[in-house]
Amino acid sequence: MNLIFKRYPILFVTLALMAMTSCTKTDGGGGGGGTNTKANIIGSVVVYDDQGNINSDDKAGVRVELLNGTKVVASTLTTTAGYYTLANAPFGSYSLRFSRDDIGTYKLYNISHQYNSSNVGASTVISTVQLGLRGTTTVTGLSYVGNTYNSLPGASFTLTVDPDPNTNSRAYFRIFVSTNANVSKDNYGVATELRSLISNNATIGFTKDEMTVLGLSTGQTAYIRVYGDSFQANVYTDADTGKKVYPNLNDNTVAAVSFVVP
C-alpha cells in the first residue's frame, strides 16, 4: 500500500475528497438531491379600500408570516411598494398569514416551497395577494318587518347604516343566520354572499325558497345579525375548523333579530 501511495499520491487525495463530499452532501428537498436546503420566498400585496378601489399608497406595513402549522417560521413587513421577502426559508410546505390592524387577518394555505434543481437558489414566488381594508359601514339599526319578501312568503327587515350610502359609495354588508340566539360573525350557521345598499332605511330579507337553501325549515325560530363588510372581502376557509372566516367585517353592529320561518 505504501508503495502504491508513493507512486499515485494524487489519486489517493482525489478519492479522499470524493468520499468527504459524498458524506456531507444534503438533500435539497423535493427530491432534488441538491446542496441547498433553503431559499427565499418572495411576493407582493395590493390593498383595496372598502369600495373596491386600489390604494396605491397603502401597501406598506402588512405583516407576512410563514407558518408551519401554528409555528411562525419567519416574519417580515411589506415595503412601501408592497413587496416582501422571507429570506432563507427552509424548504417545506407552509401557510402564509397576512395581517394589519385595518385589514384583519388573511391566510393562504398549501404553500409549496421546494428545491429547484434546474435553477439552484431560485426563490419561490407567490402571486400578488389582493387585500381589502375593513368595511367602513356601521350597522345602526335592524328590525323585523314581516313574513313576506319581494311579495313572496319569506322574512323582511329594515336595515339602517352609517354613513348614508349612495350610488357612488355603496354600503356593503353580510348577513349571518343561525337558529342560535347568540348568532355572530364567529358563531353562525350560514352567511350570505356580499350584499350592498345605495340608500338608507332599506328593506332586506329572504324568500321562503332562499331560506330553504340556507338550511332553514318551516316553523323554526331563526336569528340574523348584520355586519358592514368590504367589497374586497378576503374570505377564506380555516383549515382547522372548516369554517369560513370574514376578516374585513366592521365589528360595530347591533343585536340579532329573530323571525319564524314561514
Image: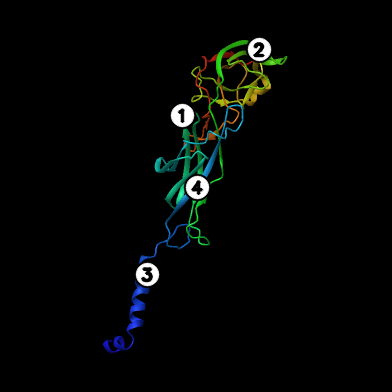
| Residue at the image position 43 percent from the left and 41 percent from the top | 76
Whichever of labels 1 and 4 marks the residue nearer the N terminus, that label is 4
Find residue 129 and report its horizontal and vertical position in percent.
55, 40
In the picture, the disc for residue 147 is 2
Quadrant showing the N terminus: bottom left
Q: Secondary structure at mark 3?
A: helix
Q: What residue lies at 65% left-to-right and 14% top-to-bottom? A: 202
Label number found at residue 42: 4
- Spatial CA span between label 1 and label 4: 22 Å
- Mark linked to residue 21: 3
| Label 3 – label 4 distance at C-alpha | 31 Å
Residue, far right:
151
Q: Is residue 54 above or below residue 200?
A: below
Instruction: Find the distance from the CA under tag 2 to the CA under tag 4.
Output: 53 Å
Q: Of the residues shown, which amino acid type is indicated by label 3?
A: Thr
Query: Which is nearer the N-term, disc 3 or disc 1?
Result: 3
Q: Earlier in the sequence, mark 2 or mark 3?
A: 3
Disc 2 residue crowd, few under 14, some 14–19, many 20+, Cα 10 Å:
many
**Foreground: 211 or 37?**
37
What amino acid type is highlighted by mark number 4? Ile
Alpha-carbon span between mark 2 and mark 3: 79 Å
Of pointers 1 and 2, the one earlier in the residue sequence: 1
Indicate the amino acid at tag 1.
Asp
Give percent across and percent down for residue 11: 36, 82
Identify which residue, 53 or 64, lies in the foreground: 53
Q: Amino acid type of disc 2?
A: Asn
Q: Find residue 177 and report its image quarter.
A: top right
